[in-house]
Amino acid sequence: MEKQLADFCEIEWQRMLDATSLEVVLEANAIVSAPAETVEAVITLFRLPRALIKEATAFARENAEACLRSRHDVPSMTVVDPWDARRRAMLEERVCLVLDRLVRLTERHWGLPKEATAFSRYNATTDLLREVASKWEQGQLAYHQALQKCDTNANQVDRLIQKTEVPTSRKRPLQKRGDTTEERLRGLLNTQDGVRSILAAGTVDGVASLIHRSHGSVAGSVAWKMEIKPLLERLKAERVYARLECEERRRDRHQTD
């Protein structure tokens, strides 16, 4: 299914960063569970945040494609910049935070001195942030070149829309109907109380019961597939991440005592 602009909203961006960060930390935990046999093992560990850059770049690229489709359909439509500086800064901050977590893992499990980890972290940070800058520059260049083509053809698109528009006299009057499953789900997503009720429901059956619809109608809806299910998966991932943090703090206190 072709993605829409709503699929690249702020909550989806944060969900992608959170999920990928968790995957990197879990992979790092698996690596440090065995002794470090070579220096290359440490270097490889500190390159794991590259997965964040890969996912964020793919997210921005797909977002740009959705923006271009919207501009093509409605040339006057204003769309956000998928390669904006704010999201780049958020990505850079997340890369640094994950690196900090990896440093703590190497010091705790491999017994590496702080001087060694500080040097490795500095080199990794330099390389990773340079890669972010390069990917973002390439993405911006390609996106704005495509935008220029859209603007050049804007007048032709306007004329095409005018030719295909149905005359007012031929439009059929709208008939009243009840809200569809999609509309009920969107109604919940558009309010804070609705989102809270979705999180409390927790499952597709719980959400179906919430709006008095069947399991199949909710599970087959766009709102469930593209927004609600990812939201619940993000909540689950955050709880796992929180348990890992608590377990690490508990081990740290035990070692200190």
Image: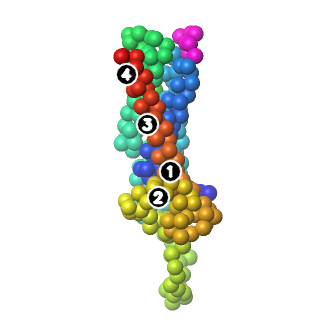
In what element is the residue under mark 4? helix
What amino acid type is highlighted by mark number 1?
Answer: Leu
Res 105 label: none
**Disc 2 versus disc 4: distance between alpha carbons?**
37 Å
- Asked whether disc 4 touches disc 1, contact meaning CB atoms under 8 Å apart, the reply is no
Q: Disc 1 versus disc 3: distance between alpha carbons?
A: 15 Å
Q: Is the C-beta separation of discs 2 and 4 under 8 Å? A: no
Mark 2 residue element: helix
Please give the range of residues in magenta.
34-41
Packing grade of label 2 (10 A; few <14, some 14-19, many >=20) is many
Residue placed under numbered mark 3 in the picture = 242
Distance from Cα at disc 1 to Cα at disc 2: 8 Å
Closer to the chain start, of discs 3 and 2, is: 2
In three-dimensional space, the C-alpha distance between marks 3 and 2, rounded to whole angstroms, equals 21 Å
- Residue density around tag 1, few if under 14, some if 14–19, many if 20 or more, within 10 Å: some
In the image, residue 18 lies at what x, y percent? 46, 40
Determine whether label 1 and label 2 are within 8 Å by CB: yes
Above or below for 44 versus 56: above
Please state which of residues 85 and 239 is positioned toward the viewer in this rendering: 239
- Name the residue nearer the viewer: 245 or 160: 245
Q: Residue 253, labelled with which disc?
A: 4
Element assignment for label 1: helix
Above/below status of 97 relative to 83: above
Q: Give the residue at mark 1.
A: 232
